Amino acid sequence: MKKHNFSAGPAILPASVIKEAAAGVLELDGIGMSILEISHRSAEFIAIAAEAESLARELLQIPADYAVLFLSGGASGQFSMSAMNLLNENQSAGYLDTGTWSSKAIKEAKAFGKVQVLASSKDQNYNYIPTGYDIPAGLRYVHVTSNNTIFGTQLREFPTTDAPLVADMSSDIFSRRIPLEKFGLIYAGAQKNMGPAGVTLVIVRKDLLGQVDRHLPSMLDYRIHIENESMFNTPPVYPIYVSMLTMRWVKAQGGLEAMERHNEAKAKLLYDEIERNPRFQCTVPNPQDRSLMNVTFVCTDDADTKPFLAAAEAAGCDGIKGHRSVGGFRASIYNSMPLESVQVLVDVMKNF
Amino acid sequence: MKKHNFSAGPAILPASVIKEAAAGVLELDGIGMSILEISHRSAEFIAIAAEAESLARELLQIPADYAVLFLSGGASGQFSMSAMNLLNENQSAGYLDTGTWSSKAIKEAKAFGKVQVLASSKDQNYNYIPTGYDIPAGLRYVHVTSNNTIFGTQLREFPTTDAPLVADMSSDIFSRRIPLEKFGLIYAGAQKNMGPAGVTLVIVRKDLLGQVDRHLPSMLDYRIHIENESMFNTPPVYPIYVSMLTMRWVKAQGGLEAMERHNEAKAKLLYDEIERNPRFQCTVPNPQDRSLMNVTFVCTDDADTKPFLAAAEAAGCDGIKGHRSVGGFRASIYNSMPLESVQVLVDVMKNF
């Protein structure tokens, strides 16, 4: 039976990418060796890394004054690394608290400078995106989580402020166009929209660096990774390779504009059924706060929860059990998820 | 033509592991999904991670008072993380300086406490392992690089001291038996003897932790990774999977005792030819300092260098060009390198 992978991450990858990724493990492009066993200094991998950077630049329209890095350690590593590199002890940064990952970013940043929580939706179990809050002038940066994987909310618009934005885009990078000029730093763990687990995309405006007083260990200093073109140490070769293949696929689909349309169509199909079907309810009341990536919903009658999960699994829908902090269901419908798979889930809902 | 992969790292993996690793990308064990797209919280990956830990414990005979972690960031990340977790500012640690990686470890550690370089072979371009140096009592730890990938030297014996040893074993982990009880911390980037690039094995004696005064970011705190069984954040799923397959292979070969015999036989074959053949010379004068993993040698007449490299490449020997700090040649003959491939290189030398 065909599986429809609704996992929140590590998550579905395009079927064509999986095929190429498997072929590269057996033998990379006819060179007589596997992608797993070639040097990161080999001509073959240097070309792969360069193509990955160039695809990221092209898809997100990243200008030359920004560096593009492929690091390890995930977004969780970036929570501290970003603050360590950007924020002096006597400086203030604003943080928007929209979920578990925002609050972890806040916790890590507090060790390095003054953290102002600009607004929080914690009072309603993070089921909305705060609006109408003030952003004081003169902050070093304003940190946002663009999409909240656990709570099914997404920032459709980004705050306007005199400070550069720093964003954790782990769960919606490459899913839509973004106003890049607003951002000083963007980081994203690969394992939702970019590739397999094990690599983190970092996009940073270079003029923001080199302004903190503290000692930075080499591995945690963006400048050192920039000088060494992400090869200060052995990079995660295979995760970068598969991310490059995935970005190639995004480009072939028509780039971020096409991804956006595709993601909107999938999300509409699913949210429309949740709205129409009295047996289900979206956990995010305000339609404009709803994520195009992670659709969270519950059964109106809790007695339906187990049977519906069983029905969905019987139809091959994998990974739709909700996160324990929300309950119910979460259908993650990242870039690589085909409309047909969302239709399968919607059909289960209709027939339930 | 069959390629013989003598790359220093990322490096050769067993042919059977490459096959299984490719199959897992297409579909993991008949579950209908790729290893690249399953959740790190799935039953399948939890079992893989548990088997990886259990194989590491079995192969290296790691007792229960040591934690076994699979982290990202490579050995370069461990240079600072180990010092940050173990060394207070007013404490001293001893470092043995045996090459480029030792000196990088020294540089990173200096930011966190007092670093005493116990001995150095820098005076001879790191072509020997120092002996006869004193180790003062009362050091917090003594750091060694067990094998020096670039310079072709290896610590056949480990120092005896009242302090626990901290060792970078990136390039010889699982290649031989080690006296584990001497070590407080062992770290090893996977990409030589354990798997593909992107994961780092860390073995740490738990009672050494929690004794520093400084703030540790969560991602850099071994205790947090221990509490979360290496799943504080999304781990590098695929590099861990392939490392597990490689450890299974090591076990199937007979474990570390068998690896040791196999590696000694391969190294003997190559060093014997270097000794016998007047056109070649080993860059490490003292036979007992010579690495079983990385065999470094030059042509006695430099005019032979280019033609010999061409002859070796024509025979399918890939990656034998020496590191720029040593010149000449470096044949890396890690666990997965078959004796037959070493024989191919030796035959090229004989016929040259």
Image (cartoon, coloured by chain):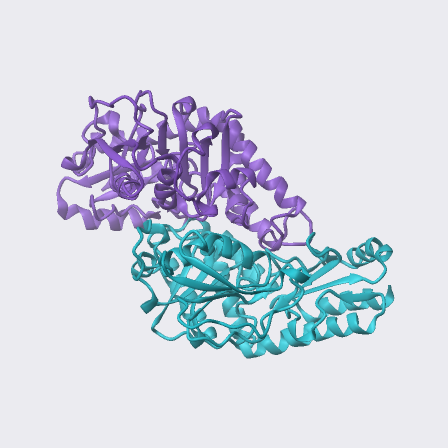
Chain colours: A purple, B cyan
When the figure is inspected, residue B276 is found, relative to residue A107, above or below; the finding is: below
Q: Can residue B293 be spotted in the picture?
A: no
Picture quadrant where residue A153 is located: top left
Foreground pick, A31 / B67: B67
Residue drawn at (78%, 68%) of the image: B346
Note whether B276 is above or below A93 in the view shown: below
| Image side of residue A182 versus residue B76, left or right | left
The mark total stands at: 0
Residue A328 in the image: x percent, y percent? 21, 44
Q: Is residue B103 above or below residue B271?
A: above
| Picture quarter with the N terminus of chain B | bottom right
Q: Residue at coordinates 62% horizontally, 69% vertically from top-left?
A: B129
Q: Is residue A150 visible?
A: yes
Is B72 displayed left or right of A22 in the figure?
Answer: left
State left or right for residue A173 relative to residue A89: right
Quarter holding the C terminus of chain B is bottom right
Where residue B223 appears, x then y in whole percent? Answer: 31, 59
Residue B324 place in picture, x, y as percent: 70, 52
* Residue B313: % across, % down: 78, 55
Q: Nearer the viewer, residue B210 or B257?
A: B210
Nearest to the observer: residue A301 or residue B323: B323
Which of the 4 quarters of the picture holds residue B146?
bottom right
